[in-house]
Image: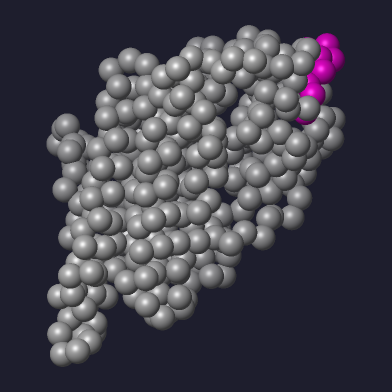
Amino acid sequence: MPDRAPQPVERELPTEEARDLVTLVRDIVQREIAPRAAEQEDAGHFPREIFTLLSESGLLGLPYDSEFGGGDQPYAVYLQVLEELASARLTVGLGVSVHSLACHALAGYGTKEQRAEHLPAMLGGGLLGAYCLSEPASGSDAASLRTKAVRDGSDWVITGTKAWITHGGVADFYTVLARTGGEGARGITAFLVPGDAAGLSPAAPEKKMGMKGSPTAQLHFDGVRVPDARRIGEEGQGFAIALSALDSGRLGIAACAIGVAQAALDEALAYATGRRQFGRPIADFQGLRFMLADMATQIEAGRALYLAAARLRDAGRPFSRQAAMAKLFCTDAAMKVTTDAVQVLGGYGYTADFPVERFMREAKVLQIVEGTNQIQRMVIARHLAGPETR
């Protein structure tokens, strides 16, 4: 079957600098990420070298302040960069999104001194971060977390277990939410914990159906001592900080989902135009043409939705409802598009010889991470109809 090179997505970019950024990302994708993506995912290889390259290229701190090593880019630009990365390898795109999530607390709520001390290395100094909110017994009900931080002089001592941590065991720093007060959301505080802190140990990585190159692990905190200078925000402010980070993080997941869906559509188009049955390309058959049209429409709609939410964020306007909508729609669309891509390829789609089976396995996790899609529906409904009555 002849190769059909995918056409680059036409992007809405506000400046020449943003266009140069996307050109740089596409070059890195073509040279460094895409050629080894399938092999490395199959081997479970975590591409730390790629994250180092992205940091050196100024791509790990795009939405943050240049005063501290960031890129001063609007979120609408940053998300399109994420989409490009995720279309080549979700382990990389999602990894950049998680790193940005881990930087959010310090960038948004840290003191000037804290930001000056830590952010340059986090945003452009080669460090990689992780975000620690979920626990074995508190996933969707994150406010019920049990990991404790107890004050001891000028330090805090953290004890407990975090679960489902992307980059668990390989990150250089962790943004950790721990209980410093009473029950509920008001008793939670945020901390910046070094990855090599004494008493911090990762469990064996989870054995996942997809994203095998991205380590996901529990983290055990056995009396981890953290100075008060690494507390982020006020005591008891941690849950509000976490929710603020998740609003932005959900847009990152939405962009990654559209990247995976776009990659699946590109593969399906290449196959459909090259595969011949009954004397002509299968792309000539109306049933398949309609499938491709629906796939493309869902991708375009998802992209428009996450960009609309990003523009609200960039304008300083509320965007929580739109972020939940974008995460919900884009990840559901990715699951549908990747499943349809497997169907387009038929038996070949069910084999590891073609990447669409990997895309389908990867799309599933995007409906779960950073708030399941059932939680997103609850968030949206709460914005529309108010809190649930008891």
Residue 251 location in percent, x, y? Answer: 40, 35
Instruction: State whether the magenta stretch is mostly helix, strand or loop.
Output: strand
- The residue located at (37%, 16%) in the rendering is 318
Q: Is residue 190 left or right of residue 198?
A: left
Q: Is residue 388 left or right of residue 285?
A: right
Q: Where does the N terminus fall, quadrant-wise?
A: bottom left
- The residue located at (69%, 55%) in the rendering is 205
- The residue located at (39%, 56%) in the rendering is 336
- Colour pattern of the rendering: one colour
In this view, 272 is above or below 15:
below
Residue 145 location in percent, x, y? Answer: 73, 27
Which residue is nearer to you in this view: 202 or 316? 316
Name which quarter of the figure residue 44 lies in: bottom right
Q: Residue furthest front?
A: 390
- The residue located at (17%, 81%) in the rendering is 281
Residue 302 location in percent, x, y? Answer: 30, 42
Which residue is nearer to you in this view: 13 or 57? 13
In this view, 355 is above or below 207:
below
Q: Where does the C terminus fall, quadrant-wise?
A: top right
Tell me, yes or no, whether the highlighted magenta stretch contains residue 149: yes
| Residue 230 in view | no
Residue 180 location in percent, x, y? Answer: 76, 16
Tell me, yes or no, whether the highlighted magenta stretch contains residue 11: no
Name which quarter of the figure residue 87 lies in: bottom left
How many numbered discs sit on the rendered protein?
Answer: 0
Q: Bounds of the magenta span?
A: 147-156
In this view, 40 is above or below 176:
below
In this view, 72 is above or below 41:
above
Q: Is residue 192 left or right of residue 211?
A: right
| Residue 153 in view | yes
Q: Residue furthest bottom?
A: 279
